Every structure is written in structure tokens, then in C-alpha cells.
Amino acid sequence: MINSGWNDLLHDHSLPAAIIDLDALDANIERIRTQAERSGKTIRIASKSIRVPFLLKRILERGKGTFQGLLTYSLTESVFLYQEGFRDLLLAYPTLQKKDFVQVIPLLKNDPNAITFMIDSPEHLEFLSACAQENSLPNPIPVCIDLDMSYRPFGIHLGVQRSPIRSEQDLLEFIGEFKKYSSIRLKGLMGYEAQIAGLADQNPFQPILNPIKKFLKRRSVPDVARKRASYASLLKERGISIELFNGGGSGSLTSTLQEEVVTEATAGSGFLQSHLFDYYPSNQQEPAIYIALRSSRRPQSDIITCQGGGIIGSGEAGVEKAMIPVFPEGLSLMNSEGCGEVQTPLRLKHQGVTIHLGDAIFFRPAKAGEPLERFKSVLLISGGKIQGEVPTYRGLNQEFQ
């Protein structure tokens, strides 16, 4: 847990710096592992929420077999992770870039299950089939169909715009397209319920909307379960077997793991617990990722200014996407400036806060893996000591879009 000793630990380190609290991370791993074991499901790790190979390996190893495989976000990232020794990679987003696909040809020739590709349209099938034929792949490419899990009362779309497959008929028609392509093999289904997993209903930044969000999530949970069950039943009735049915995210683990047809759930942000994930009533994880800035100015007695700070989470723009100061306690962002690109002023809420110029100020980012694209390494702290420093994707000269 963060304490005053962390300031001394960073005395000789250049800031800004990204920090991982290994003790909190390990506690989060154990909670998620226990929850999954009770359900009899496995957990697939979302690489986009980690972006540090050392941490991905640590999470998988401490999952003791309950954690299996990675949910990746980029084809080039998938190839890199395979070369780093990771296996069972499910690429979560469709790709239509031949230049990127060339990198995966050697992998698929040696290991036909190296990467499973996400698809949801005939164009994806056509692309993969053409790549397979042009490169004489000896085995069919494994694919996973992305299903729309949005909640649509009265035709209103509540969720994210992902897959166009929104009904059993849509799925049947799409699977019918497979007959045209002998170079494609259906491996599984994925149904991500973003309106549950990605919707915080105890958000202190938008309290007036929380009751509405709670209501929508209560209605959406059974709706999603019904949809996934109907898709699984549809395939079973037609004798179509699949190896996996993926669902969920850190924000919806509790409900997803209760569904019989789901074989695995995805988790990522819950391991590092960025601050947006505090605002879910079922999420009891500990903060494990911090960003440290150096205090450098005192424009007036009740304001301290730090160098840097403009690390903002993606998604719909809002004040909750900024980092929040958490240590020393008693600091708050200023509405007039927020987190700036080159400096971040903080207001001291009361006289009991003592900060010297040069001290480290600790923030929690809104999102987990995304801020680590700004850093070449992360500092690992455990037991009140720096245990090491390990490279991020960027530190390994890897940039994935």
C-alpha cells in the first residue's frame, strides 16, 4: 500500500514514472482466481490492460491454470507476444491489413492454432481466406465470431458499436458463409457486454446518472445471459461444436461467470485496478498502478504544481478520464486546468498537507494499460522496496495500434 516511504524510494528516479504495487497486484490475482475457480470457468487476460510482458507472465503463472490465454488487441502485438512465449492468443478485433498479416504466416505454418482471429462479417472471411490461399497455409485459420451483446429496448441501442450480428438469424446466415471457405475453421464465439462491463454505476463524477445506469444494468444482465444461451443452443441444435465461448470483462465478472454456456471470461483492468474500476459495487480489487509526478512549483501557498500529468483515458471525454491525485492525501485537481500536458496544479484542501518542492506526488490513472504506452518501463514495489524495473511494450521498442 502506498505510504510516505514511497517518496524516498523515488528520490533518485526520473519522474514521471509508472509504478506497479506487486503486493496489490498479487492480491487482485488471487481474488479473481478464486472467483473463477468457484465458477468452474477460466480467465483470459486482456493484454491491452497490462502491456508489460513481465506482468502478463506473472498473472498467468499465479493463476495456477485458472488463467489461460490472452485476449490481444493488435495483430502485430499478437505476433510479438507469441514470439515472447505466450500461447492461446485470441485477437479481439478484426484485421484487414495484409501488410500486418504477412508477419503471422510463419507462425500459422508452424502452429495452426497460434492466433485465433475475430470476425463478424463476410469481408473478414474473404480477407482471411485470400491470405491463406496466397500464402499456401496448410491448415484452416481458426476464427471466433463476435456477437453483439448490446441492450436494445424499443430498438434503442445501449452498448458499443461492434458486431452486426444481433440475432440468431444473423448468426445462422453468417455461419452459412463458411461453406465457401475451406481455409477457415470456426473455433468459438465471443459476446462482450460493454454496457455492463464498461459502465460504472457508482461514478462520483456523474452521480445523477448512477440510478439510471444501475437500472439499465439490472435489465441488461438477464438479457445478455438469454442471448448467449440462445446462441449456444442454436449451434448445439445444428451439431456445430465450438471450443470456447468468451464473455465479460473486469466490470462484469460476477454476472458473466454465473452463465452456464460461457467457458471463459476476460479480465484485464481488474488486475491493476485503475480508478474507473472503483465505481463498480461488485469490484473489490486494490489499486496496483500509480503514476508519480515531481512537484516543481508553488504558485501560491495553497497550490502545488507538478511536472507533466496529461495522461488521459480514452473513450467518451469527461473529467473522470483524468488521473486523480491520491498521495499525499488532501490534494485535488483544479477545475480550471485539470491534468495538463506539461504541468498539473493541485490545490491543498487543508493546512495539514505538507509538500516540499521536489517531492513525488502519486496519481491513479483512469485506465490501466493505456497509460503505459507513455513509459518505457515500470517500477515494481513490494514490501516498501523497489524490487526491480521491467520494460513496457514501448521499452521493448514495440508500438501497437
Image (tube, rainbow, N blue to C red):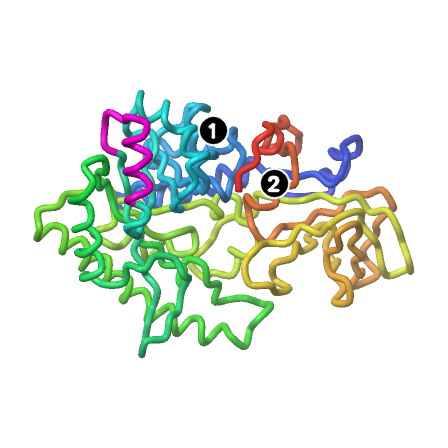
**Residue 47 in the image, given as x and y percentages of width and height:** 46, 39
Who's the residue at 18% across and 62% down the image? 169
Residue marked by disc 2: 373
Are there few (<14), some (14-19), or many (20+) residues within 10 Å of tag 1?
some
Quadrant showing the N terminus: top right
Asked which secondary structure carries label 2, the reply is helix
Is 313 left or right of 138, judged from the image as shown? Answer: right
Say if residue 383 shows up in the picture: no
Pick the residue in front: 171 or 27: 171
Q: Is residue 357 visible?
A: yes
Write the start and end of the magenta stretch as one range: 125-140
- Residue 72 shows which numbered tag? none
Q: Determine crowd level at label 2: few under 14, some 14-19, many 20+ residues with C-alpha closer than 10 A.
A: some
Q: What residue do we see at 27% from left, 62% from top?
A: 166
**SS at badge 1:** helix
> What amino acid is found at the position of numbered circle 1 in the picture?
Phe
In this rendering, is residue 59 above or below 160?
above
- Residue nearest the observer in this picture, 338 or 289: 338
Numbered badge on residue 80:
1
Q: Is residue 171 left or right of residue 298?
A: left
Q: Whole-Å distance between the Cαs marked 1 and 2?
A: 16 Å
Q: Is residue 139 magenta?
A: yes
Q: Is residue 272 magenta?
A: no
Q: In the figure, 73 relative to 249: above or below? A: above
Q: Earlier in the sequence, mark 1 or mark 2?
A: 1
Which of the two discs, 1 and 2, sits closer to the camera? 1
